[in-house]
Amino acid sequence: MEKTITLGCAGFPVPATRYFKEFLFVEIQEVHVSPGTGTIRRWRREAPEGFDFSVVAPRDIGQEGFRSGKVIESALKSLREVSKELVASTAVFVAPPDFSSSRANKAMVKEFLGSIQRKFDRIVWEAPTSWDPDDAASLAEDAGAIAARDPLTQGIGEGAVAYYRLPGPAGHKSRYEDPAIERLADLARSAEHDDATYVFTNVDMFADAKRLKKALKLA
C-alpha cells in the first residue's frame, strides 16, 4: 500500500483562499475563542475536495492537568462543536510545558485520553519536551491515541499512523534552513508509516511547509 504523507500549518498563516491552493490540511488553534461559526462554515465551504482539518483543544484542558471537571467538560464541548462543523478528522491535546512525567500525571492523561475515544475520530496528544518521547508514545498508544513528536529532535516514531509537529529549530520565531528541510524529507520518505502528518507551527510555517512539499515532490 502506498503511504500517505500530509503537510500543513498550525492555523492559516496566509488568507485561507491562498492556503487552499497549496495544501490539503490545516490544524486549527484556539477553538474556544475563535473562529466564529460563520468563519468555520466558510472554511468548510471554500476548502477544496479532500481537504482535512484537525483541531487543537483549548489550553484549559492541559492547564487543568487533564482532570475531569466542569472546565474540561466545557472545553470539550466547544472542541466537539468546532470539530463537527469542520468535519475534522483529528483532535490534538497539548500538555503545558511544566506538566511533569510523574506517575500521577501519566495515569491522569491515560484516563483522560481513554475517556474521549468515542468523541473524535483520531486523538493526538503532545507531551512536553521534558518527557521521554518513547514513554509518551507508549502511554498514548495504551490509551488508543497517537503521541505527537518533533521528528528532528525526537526521531521518527513507530506505528502505522503518525502525527509530527514542527515548532522551529530554535523556537516559534525561527525558520528551518535548507539542510533541515532536506533532513525532514529524508525522514518522511524513510518512515514506515501508512499515514503521516507533518504540521509546521513556527513563524515561517507557510514557506517552510512549501519547501518540504517541494522536497518531497508532492502535488
Image (cartoon, rainbow, N blue to C red):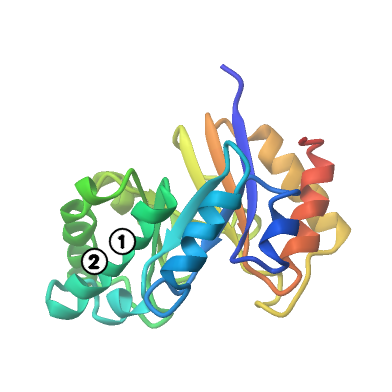
- At x 45%, y 74%, the residue is 30
Horizontal side of residue 9 vs 158, given as left or right? right
**Amino acid, disc 1:** Glu
Identify residue for label 2: 77
**Quadrant where the image shows the C terminus:** top right
Identify residue for label 1: 81
Horizontal side of residue 92 vs 53, given as left or right? left
Q: Position of residue 218 (x, y in %)?
A: 76, 36
38 relative to 183, above or below: below
Q: Residues within 10 Å of mark 1 (few under 14, many from 20)?
A: some
Question: Mark 2 to mark 1: distance in Å?
Answer: 6 Å
Q: Position of residue 36 (x, y in %)?
A: 44, 73
Label 1 sits on a secondary structure element that is helix
- At x 57%, y 46%, the residue is 197
The answer to whether residue 154 shows anywhere in this view is: no
- At x 18%, y 63%, the residue is 107
The answer to whether residue 24 shows anywhere in this view is: yes
For this rendering, which residue is in front, 71 or 137?
Answer: 71
